[in-house]
Image (cartoon, grey):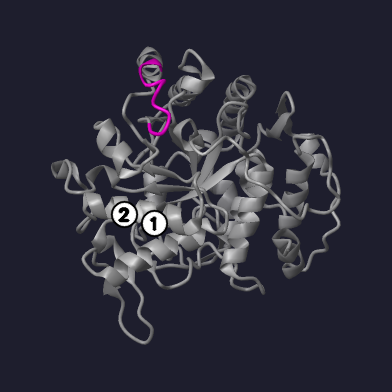
Amino acid sequence: MTNYVNKLLLSLGENTDLSVDEWTNNNLISSGLKKWVAKIVPAQLLERSVKQAVESILTLSEDGVFYKNFPEKIETPQYGDNWGRLANYIEINNRAIAEMYANRTKNGILSSIKILPAIPPSAKSWANCIILSQIFPNIYGDGYNKGPKEENSIYGIKLNSSYSENIIDYDIDMLAEEQFKVFNDLAHFRGLKTGFRTVISADQIKVAIPYEKDVTFDWDNPEHQELFIESHVKLINTGFEAIFIDSAKHIGGYDMENYTGVGALPSYNQMQYILHEIRKRSGSTSLSFVGEKSSEDFERYKNLGLTSGTAFVSSDNYDDVKFWSYKLKYERTYAPGVEVSNDNDEGGTSYESRLNRINTILFAYEYPSDKLPSFMQMEDLFPLRYDTNTHHLMMTNPSYSTDATPFSHWENLFAKEDGREYNFKVAQLFAKALNL
């Protein structure tokens, strides 16, 4: 069995002998046996080496044992096949935290590894799940950053063309799928589930054809449908267990007057088949499919094969969320969800409001087993600088570096001392919830 963490360390010119990370011990918060790094700004983690990140993750080991070499076999945290029904989904924009060198963007998966020590681990009763914003190449400008007003959308993807140059380290002797396996092994060691965002609007997907011009995806083309299924199965086989489906509410032509995507969507029966095949071919019975805003017609989305939807009830109303958690307590395979914020968030929400929403999603229930699933963004853990927002970073890919170095970008992408204090307040909320 290949130890992919060791393979990555060796590929980066490091050795595989690991030591306790004192920086982590000096910056951690704990809740019983669960530990993570808090009261930080992301640049403190992102400037560290991958080896330091691995040592940090091992230092946070929940069993209290420090492994001088990364373990050979890592299992995903066990919460049963229907874990996604209760989970908190935390989307990390791995493109935004990638390494920015002048106009190039690269190595977002390495940055995602480095941020893992600061993600609160799962609770006794429910899992926290990281959703990565980008996996596939974006259609135009992949591998490059542009000015803050130049479009470089993460919502347009290319299939049949490996993975994004923004994300994978193509300068080392390690396959993209192996790099995803490293991320997933390290996240699972941290007690986290993992997943990724995908799109289903046909005109937002291109299919790469060798030695020919890319073609627009067509849901009526059986070869394109098969490519979509196999592309997602391949990722599941690297350890991901959740897929967030953009525009899922509108599958089969539902509520199209509010559809903001571009292009045709799969039919209802077609999407049922696709989700069934991803489960079947991957051999995973525990996959979670989260549908954007697919929350109003419960039976429709449950029968489609989804695990949860988003934005059904406002997280600004604690009592309403608690009411619905009670009302749906016996629905164990699908439930509508609650958002702290989503990928269309344009900023302007106060820290106090975000903290109140996080309090709601973590505590608005009678029993932890009744909890509704929730969705939040990187910004809800690590506040962004004042003049950008989550949606802006999905639509564009600016570098905020003042000297063409990655550290300057990381330092200036996020809020500074106020962001540090906010991060600590979020950690205190999670600390109260993790042993419920």
The circle drawn on residue 79 is: none
Check disc 2 and report the residue beneath it: 273
Vertical position of residue 269 compared to residue 212: above or below: above
Foreground of the two, 258 or 409: 258
Q: Can the viewer see residue 359?
A: no
Identity of the residue furthest to the left in this view: 257
Membership of 328 in magenta stretch: yes
Identified by mark 1, the residue type is Glu
Question: Residue, x 74% and y 51% (percent of image)?
Answer: 54
Relative side of 363 to 190, left or right? left
Mark 1 touching mark 2, by CB under 8 A? yes
Residue 180 rendering spot, x and y as whole percentages: 58, 59
Whether the magenta-drawn stretch holds residue 280 is answered as no
- What secondary structure do most residues of the magenta stretch adopt? loop
In terms of secondary structure, where does tag 2 sit?
Answer: helix
Q: Position of residue 103 (x, y in %)?
A: 49, 67
C-alpha span from label 1 to label 2: 6 Å
Question: Is 2 in front, or is 128?
Answer: 2
Residue 105 seen from this side: yes
Tag 2: residue type?
Tyr
Q: Which residue is mark 1?
A: 277
Q: Is residue 302 placed above or below 211 in the rendered structure?
A: above
- Residue drawn at x 35%, y 80% is 209
**345 sits to left or right of 127:** left
Counting other residues with Cα less than 10 Å from the Cα at mark 2, is it few (<14), some (14-19), or many (20 or more)? some
Q: x%, y% of residue 175?
A: 60, 70
Locate the N terminus by quadrant.
Answer: bottom right
Picture quadrant where residue 255 is located = top left
Left or right of residue 428, residue 288 in this image: left
Residue range highlighted in magenta: 326-334
Q: Quadrant of the C terminus?
A: top right
